Amino acid sequence: MKNDKTIKDYTKIAFLVLLSSIVLVMLSSFINRVFISPPVEANKDEVSKQLEPQQIQINILNANGVDGTAATVRKYLRQRGFDIVGVNNNLTIEDSTYIVDCSGDLSSAKKVAYAIGIDPLKIKSRNDPSMFVSCAIIIGKDFQSLKPWE
């Protein structure tokens, strides 16, 4: 009997240590994310401060068939310090919005993704030396979920 109680006590202690460790890791991750290395800011003043001296150059392609969506994104990003090089229509209609990293500079593409509200997992890398932009935004049919429409 006493042996069973000791095993239960050790099990409880092990569980509490494991739970405490998980909480500690989550708390340290939260503190790191919020205070030590926060994500880029989508507010235009904060984005302007975070941009490096070399501006992020962007090409915007309307791939949803709705007139004016690329122009809306252009205005939104220019107000936040981004350099919009071109606005055009895409050859095909796309269901979802994504970013193409044209220069191999994934950090710039992530800043653009955050600024307009795109999941960084929707960044596609196509390092193309003939492109003179950092990245391209392909605006799909889901454009109303982006930050310029909030």
Image (cartoon, rainbow, N blue to C red):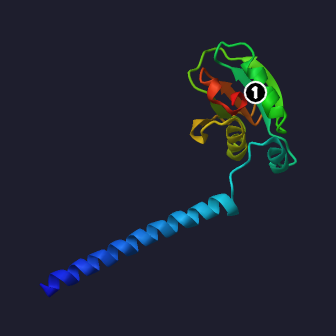
Left or right, residue 26 beside residue 125: left
**Within 10 Å of the Cα at label 1, are there few (<14), some (14-19), or many (20+) other Cα atoms?**
many
Q: Residue at x 57, y 67 (%)?
A: 28
Quadrant location of residue 128?
top right
Front-most of 95 and 91?
A: 95
Q: Residue at x 72, y 30 (%)?
A: 148
Task: Please state the horizontal and vertical placement of residue 53, each as a whole percent of the image.
Answer: 88, 48
Q: Which residue position holds label 1?
A: 73
Task: Please state the horizontal and vertical placement of residue 130, each as a whole percent of the image.
Answer: 76, 30
Secondary structure found at label 1 = helix
Q: Residue at x 57, y 25 (%)?
A: 96
Task: Please state the horizontal and vertical placement of residue 37, each as a whole percent of the image.
Answer: 69, 59
For the C terminus, give its image quadrant.
Answer: top right
Quadrant location of residue 142?
top right
Q: Is residue 46 above or below residue 65?
A: below
Left or right, residue 114 beside residue 51: left
